[in-house]
Image: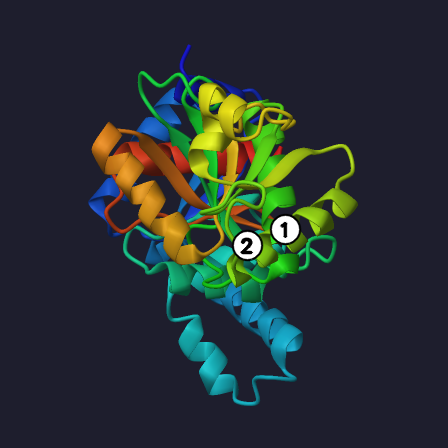
Amino acid sequence: MDIIAKIREKASLKLRTIVLPEYKDPRTIEACRIIEKEKIAKIVLLSEEMILKEKKEKYIQEFYALHKAKVNDMNEVNKLFNDPLYYAAMMVSEGDADGFVAGASHTTSDVGRAAIHCLGVDGRIGVACSCFIMAVPDCEYGAEGTFIFADCGIIPEPNPRQLACIAVTSAELAAKVLALTPRVAFLSYSTKGSAKGKTIDKVVEALGLAQGMAPGLLIDGELQVDAAIVPEVARIKYPEGPLGGEANVLIFPSLEAGNISYKLVQRLSGARALGPLILGLNKPCSDLSRGCSVEDIVDCVAVTAIRAQ
């Protein structure tokens, strides 16, 4: 059974309610049909008639109470809730649903803002970030072709503390959703001092912080990507390394590097890229690429449902 089939099966074991606010998108409508047929999750397709006036007013008041220190104008809040995205996010925040998935017709920044403002950042992690689950066909690297790539969607230039948080929360997702033993590599253009630079210093500092946050986590850096995922190269470049060229969670030094990398791998190898899965919040949700397929929506719903179990 491939990793995608395993994700769908795991989601179906304990059904959770997931909201899809992009009810006009034909891909979303078809995804709902598949999800319901395969019993992957309980779906709320948030059409206009599903939005209850009393509930909407309650959610607006709750949102305003959370943000009144920064938002003085109720008209501003009312405008936000003209988009069903905010109603969906508040459904999750208030416990009326277990997670939401959007992004087929919204930008990542739109989905990210709604998620962060409505769900709130997990105090334990302290930063909202994202990752992709990459399923690469006919690949001997990672976990039989399965990887986590992070952050590819939210933080443009993560500082050392943010990089460490990205690594820890991505590893947690790998364990919970994919049942993998996370093997985490901070990526760079240097392997253990083979080059010098400010970004390398940042990665080295992030490694120390991550080790302090999660002492039992198998993690290392800074590593070039071949030293991180190819055992033969690891034996040459860093033979004493704990990962041994078998990393399955790859942490990129910048959003630019991560975003370019996941799209290259996706397009050149025919890999499935599930996400961006938004991490570090109090409740689970997922963004989608606006170029997503129906299957991408189905599988992001499945991952979000597992995270809510």
Assign a secondary structure to mark 2: helix
Q: Is residue 51 visible?
A: no
Front residue (pair 91, 179): 179
Relative placement, left or right, of 304 versus 38 is: right
> Looking at the rendering, which quadrant does residue 240 occupy?
top right
Please name the amino acid that badge 2 sits on.
Answer: Ile
Relative placement, left or right, of 191 versus 290 is: right
Please state the horizontal and vertical placement of residue 116, each as a whole percent of the image: 55, 62
Q: Which residue is mark 1?
A: 204
Task: Specify the farthest residue to the bottom.
Answer: 72
Assign a secondary structure to mark 1: helix
Q: Where's the C terminus, which quadrant?
A: top right
Residue at the location (24% across, 29% down)? 270
Please state the horizontal and vertical placement of residue 250, each as a whole percent of the image: 50, 38
Task: Specify the farthest residue to the top.
Answer: 1
Residue at the location (72% across, 48% down)? 208
Please state the horizontal and vertical placement of residue 23, each as a whole percent of the image: 30, 50
Residue at the location (53% across, 34% down)? 249
Front residue (pair 142, 104): 142
Please name the amino acid that badge 1 sits on.
Answer: Val
Front residue (pair 182, 12): 182
> Looking at the rendering, which quadrant does residue 173 occupy?
top right
Residue at the location (54% across, 62% down)? 198
Give the CA distance from mark 2 to mark 1. Answer: 6 Å
Please tell me whether residue 63 is drawn above or below residue 291 in the rendered image.
below
Please state the horizontal and vertical placement of residue 162, each as a whole percent of the image: 61, 58
Q: What mark, if any, has residue 291 been given in the picture?
A: none
| Tag 2–tag 1 contact (CB < 8 Å) | yes
Q: What mark, if any, has residue 200 been given in the picture?
A: 2
